[in-house]
Amino acid sequence: MDNFVVSARKYRPTTFASVVGQSHITRTLKNAILTGQLPQAFLFCGPRGVGKTTCARILAKTINCEHLTPEGEACNECDSCRSFNEGASMNIFELDAASNNSVDDIRELVNKVNYPPQVGRFKVYIIDEVHMLSQSAFNAFLKTLEEPPAHAKFILATTEKHKIIPTILSRCQVFDFKRIENTDIVRHLEYVAKNEGVNYEEAALEIIATKAEGGLRDALSTFDQLVNFTQGNLTRQGCLDNLNVLDSEYYFRLIDQLRAGDMSGALLLYQELVVKGFGGQPFLTGLCEHLRNLVVSLSPQTLQLIDGSDNTRLRFGQQAQACGLQLLMAYLNMASDYEYRFREANNKNLFVEICLMRLASIAGGNGAQPQHS
């Protein structure tokens, strides 16, 4: 138990090639290293858990590597790489601006910048959550950031780019990290599960990826939690029981019931979700998202917009073709209208039930839409 390391740390990428879902970033960084065109300051922006700090550390290690590979990766064998991997590098400094955001903290950092590295080419300063710096700290940092010594590189990371003052932005090369696609998260979770000897259903990993909303760190934390809950046997049902998420399976069932005019089945399904603790607002929001996915699934070109496995896309495509555009648009118009008006309703559950009744009563599945009351 004492040796347990959470998956987010154990499987943290150590090379650009192993970074998940940010190839547009890693390709640019490797090209800059190979051509020697490195800016004095980088700004990594994006949501939490998508690889900003990880890429900052990989970049810091790679630019000090003594024997770069032809692909622009660190060798992991030279003295500089080994000291970094062991956490003993004297050239890389990390500052968490969330807890060290005063002008004195920045002045202390600035005073160290002028001293050249004793070993290696660069001193690298990684400042995480840089938007948390105070105004006076930003001002104290400006001059150094604009004209740093040749041996100093700054890598700033933030989840809130809009809070960075323009004078800082203009002095940095900005890299925008994106949310990681579900397919990339699932592929990485499969890799971790196989390495850890965990049995899994692909549907279970898809649920974890959806729950993570594009953050790989969150996905790995949830993965660890569910491995404990299911005793190393990840099943779709086990994930649903533990995470209590609105799975797309509910909506596939619901659309089939609505298309068949099965009002009773639709109401019972909603009651099942109410008993599990889901409210009307997330239910209606999920229904609108599902209907949107069905509409885009009608065309093979837009089917690729569905963020999921090939099997998930196939199911959306089959249900979309069974409904047709006219019926789907009638459903979507009515569901989105009820979602918009949900906050005004006094009896929330009754409001959702009326929505389901009206959806189920669309005559003969021909898309004829009743007038709003």
Image (tube, grey):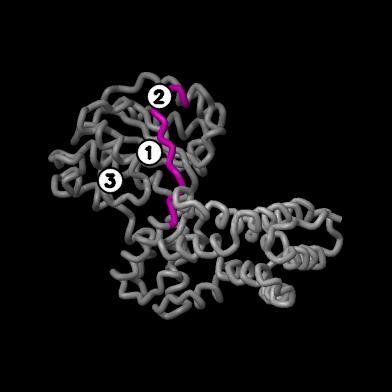
Closer to the camera, 323 or 115? 323
In whole angstroms, how far apart are the C-alphas of marks 2 and 1?
A: 13 Å
Check disc 3 and give the amino acid type.
Phe
Look at the numbered disc 2 and give the secondary structure of its residue.
helix
Is residue 364 in the magenta section? no
**How crowded is the residue under tag 1: few (<14 C-alpha within 10 Å), some, or many (20+)?**
many
Disc 2 marks a residue whose amino acid type is Leu
**Residue underneath mark 2:** 145
Badge number at residue 126: 1
Badge 1 marks a residue whose secondary structure is: strand
Q: Nearer the viewer, residue 248 or 276?
A: 248
Q: Earlier in the sequence, mark 3 or mark 2?
A: 3
List the residue tagged with mark 3.
Answer: 16
Dot 2 alpha-carbon crowd within 10 angstroms: few under 14, some 14 to 19, many 20 or more? many
Q: Which residues are magenta?
A: 169-182
Report x, y in % for residue 248: 56, 66
| Amino acid type of the residue tagged 1 in the rendering | Ile
Image point (50%, 64%), residue name: 318
